[in-house]
Amino acid sequence: MFQSILIGILPCKEEFWPIIKEKASEEEDVSIRWRSFAEIEDEGTATLVVSAVSDADPNSVIKLLHRELASAFPEENIETEMWATAPAPIDLKPKDGYQLCKDKDEKEWQDWTSHTLKEFGIIVQEGILSQKQVHEIRSLVDQAIDEVENLLRTHRPEIEIGKDSFLFKEIASRNLQRFDLRLDSIASDFVTKCVMENPTVKGILTRSLGNYDDIDFDVSAVYSKPGACVQGWHADGDHQKGGKFAGWSNDGWKNELSDPFAICLFIPLIDLNESVGFTQFWPKSHWTKDLAGFGPIAVLTNTTFDAMGKAGDAIFYDYRLMHRGMPNTSELMRPVLQVVVKKKWYVEEANYGEESIVTSKE
């Protein structure tokens, strides 16, 4: 069975990589395809981590790798160690990091946005909202938060806001001090005017999702209060029935992967940093559903992307992309405007409850 095999090598030397690709490409007539490498700090020690795809026994691959490197570099004390295996391709972070933001004035910007969003599942565009617009929507969000939390205290006094999990039509909370508040009734006009009709946003969305006549959007505020803990790794939307995964080839994301059915925009309403927190993404994890549960590998191999933008910037990500909210260790609330732009046939059913805070009996 095909799997990804991640191996750590000491000493950490980039010149090992060409030898690995040339000499360790087959074990007992079973092909080994080496995909990527990265230099990673592991407990203070620089380690060369290499990623392969094969249906060979992982232990045999490690032995082959050690044998070939020891033969090619007899002066080195080669050490090899299994880091992880996974049921889907895992590409390590490029040497120069993830290049997920590009100035709109640069040539070929439109092609870059659609290409990068399809391959990595995420792009960043700065200054989608002006500071005046940020202030306007922030006022709406703050008012909506006050109103919904007052409703909870009045009609659901048994719920300890910030500690208990709950799912209502209006708002959901699954983690400590982390909330998702629907804003469709009060913010749709603002989003239509200031987000959806923004030329940059429109250019990105039409190239990824198609004509505006075929899409609509949901809008909410995702807010984390001081003390919010780290989320578990998750994707907001599942791969759809009948959809195709990227497969095992290097360009499968281009030739096989189904186009997105939804793109989510995160627009922070305050500047994000390590203290107030941010959203951490796993680029390329939208290629398949088989990486569910393997989020710790992204952290182990430093293949994550920390989306720390300024107020008014926008993070566009494929609804299938794995991510997690990071802790809020500050004394400030972290509000983010969330706009889920989707094909009209897709209806979000998993993230909220069916019951309202105020029941019809009251």
Image: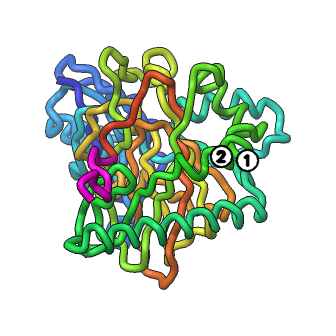
Residue at (55, 72) in percent of width and height: 273
Badge 1 vs badge 2, beta-carbon distance below 8 Å: yes
Locate residue 134 relative to residue 64 in the image: left or right: right
> Please, what is the three-letter code of the amino acid marked with disc 2?
Val
Disc 1 versus disc 2: distance between alpha carbons? 5 Å
Q: Position of residue 207 (x, y in %)?
A: 65, 25
Q: Position of residue 212 (x, y in %)?
A: 65, 24
Residue nearest the viewer, comparing 13 with 113:
113
Q: Which residue is situated farthest in the bottom direction here?
A: 331
Q: Is residue 78 among the parts visible in the rendering?
A: no
Residue at (44, 57) in percent of width and height: 181
Rendered image quadrant of residue 321: top left
Total marks shown come to: 2
Q: Position of residue 253 (x, y in %)?
A: 46, 24
- The part of the chain drawn in magenta is 352-362
In which quadrant of the rendered image does the N terminus lie?
A: top left
Q: Is residue 98 above or below residue 257?
A: below
Assess disc 2: are there few (<14), some (14-19) or many (≥20) residues with their C-alpha within 10 Å of its C-alpha: many
Q: Quickly name the residue at label 2.
A: 191
Residue at (30, 19) in percent of width and height: 241
Q: What secondary structure prevails in the magenta region? A: loop
> Please, what is the three-letter code of the amino acid marked with disc 1?
Cys
Which element is circle 1 on? helix
Q: Label for residue 72?
A: none
Q: Is residue 257 above or below residue 178?
A: above
Q: Quickly name the residue at label 1.
A: 194
Residue nearest the viewer, comparing 267 with 320:
267
Residue 360 is one of the magenta-drawn residues: yes
Q: Is residue 227 above or below residue 108?
A: below
Q: Is residue 270 among the parts visible in the rendering?
A: yes
Q: Position of residue 65 (x, y in %)?
A: 27, 39
